[in-house]
Image (spheres, helix red, strand yellow):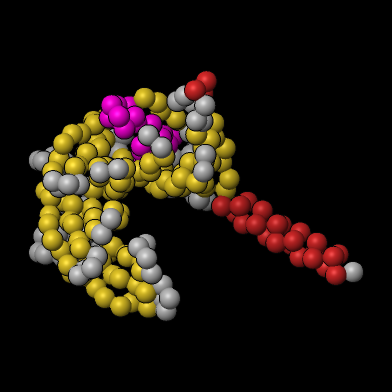
């Protein structure tokens, strides 16, 4: 989302990005990428530019000017760096998560739009999602059980790993709100894990998590709505 517009990446050949007006919730424009720029798997906005991660081999990042809604540059990653699954921005850097067998996160300088580093994870740690909170980057992995890797952005090194419970696998999405990290899992039924990110020095690097099945979360929401409704009725009396 940027301003009054929502951007949606499509898994087409070539890839497409649809622009949607949030006021009218209608499609107002579509950008079709160049030949060979297929499968828009992830999107992120920084400043006046939209960056699209492509699930091709080698992976590609397309830079799009939001004012003109046109493609202005493309960065091709190195050989063996395929499957751009996720993107995240912190400061002047773009972080690119790859779904390679040896999981990898590539660091890109947005000023020069060039690659400046890469962090390689362990075998089988496919990176599916990224999120930034403070000075840390969190990477959700498609492992079983699921894992969340904590990365120090100053040193660009792995500093901690949270392994979820048995049966909680495939961290396909991450989101941060306040002091919590929320992880969406590929389980059946779906599940969301809430992770407490400690900021206090005494708990540096620490994690505490709990999980809420989606069905239970809906029941909690319904219960809250009913309670609110009953409270309003009591006040009217």
Residue 30: percent from left, percent from top: 24, 73
Task: Determine if the magenta segment contains residue 180.
Answer: no
Q: Is residue 183 above or below residue 49?
A: above
Which quadrant of the rendered structure holds the N terminus?
bottom left
Residue at the image point whose x is 41% and y is 42% from the top: 171
| Nearer to the camera, 100 or 15 | 15
Q: Quadrant of the C terminus?
A: bottom right
Q: Is residue 15 above or below residue 54?
A: below
The image shows residue 10 at horizontal and vertical percentages of 27, 64
Can residue 156 be seen here? The reply is: yes
30 vs 214, left or right, is left
- Drawn side of residue 139 relative to residue 70, left or right: right
The spot of residue 149 in percent (x, y) is 38, 32
User: Which is more toward the observer, 174 or 217?
Assistant: 174
Point 38% across, 31% down: residue = 150
Above or below 94: residue 225: below
**Which contiguous range is marked in magenta?**
137-158
Residue 43: name its quadrant. Answer: bottom left
Name which residue lies at 65% across and 57% down.
221
Q: Is residue 157 magenta?
A: yes
Q: Give whichever of 53, 24 is nearer the camera.
A: 24
234, 135: nearer the viewer: 135
Tally the marks: 0
- From the top left corner, tell me how far across and down residue 11 is, in percent: 26, 62
């Amino acid at each position: 989302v940027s301003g009054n517009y929502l951007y949606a990446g499509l898994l087409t050949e070539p890839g497409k990005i649809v622009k949607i007006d949030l006021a009218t919730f209608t499609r107002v424009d579509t950008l079709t990428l160049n030949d060979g720029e297929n499968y828009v798997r992830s999107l992120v906005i920084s400043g006046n530019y939209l960056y699209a991660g492509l699930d091709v081999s080698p992976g590609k990042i397309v830079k799009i000017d939001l004012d003109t809604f046109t493609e202005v540059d493309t960065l091709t990653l190195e050989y063996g760096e395929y499957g751009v699954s996720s993107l995240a921005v912190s400061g002047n850097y773009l972080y690119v998560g790859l779904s390679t067998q040896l999981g990898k996160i590539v660091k890109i300088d947005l000023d020069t739009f060039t690659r400046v580093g890469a962090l390689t994870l362990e075998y089988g740690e496919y990176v599916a999602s990224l999120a930034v909170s403070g000075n840390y980057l969190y990477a959700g992995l498609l492992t079983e059980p699921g894992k969340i890797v904590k990365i120090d952005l100053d040193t660009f090194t792995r500093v901690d790993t949270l392994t979820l419970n048995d049966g909680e696998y495939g961290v396909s999405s991450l989101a941060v709100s306040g002091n919590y990290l929320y992880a969406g899992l590929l389980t059946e039924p779906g599940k969301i894990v809430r992770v407490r990110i400690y900021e206090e020095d005494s708990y540096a690097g620490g994690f505490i998590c709990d999980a809420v099945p989606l069905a239970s979360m809906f029941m909690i929401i319904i219960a809250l709505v009913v309670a609110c409704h009953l409270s309003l009725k009591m006040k009217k009396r």
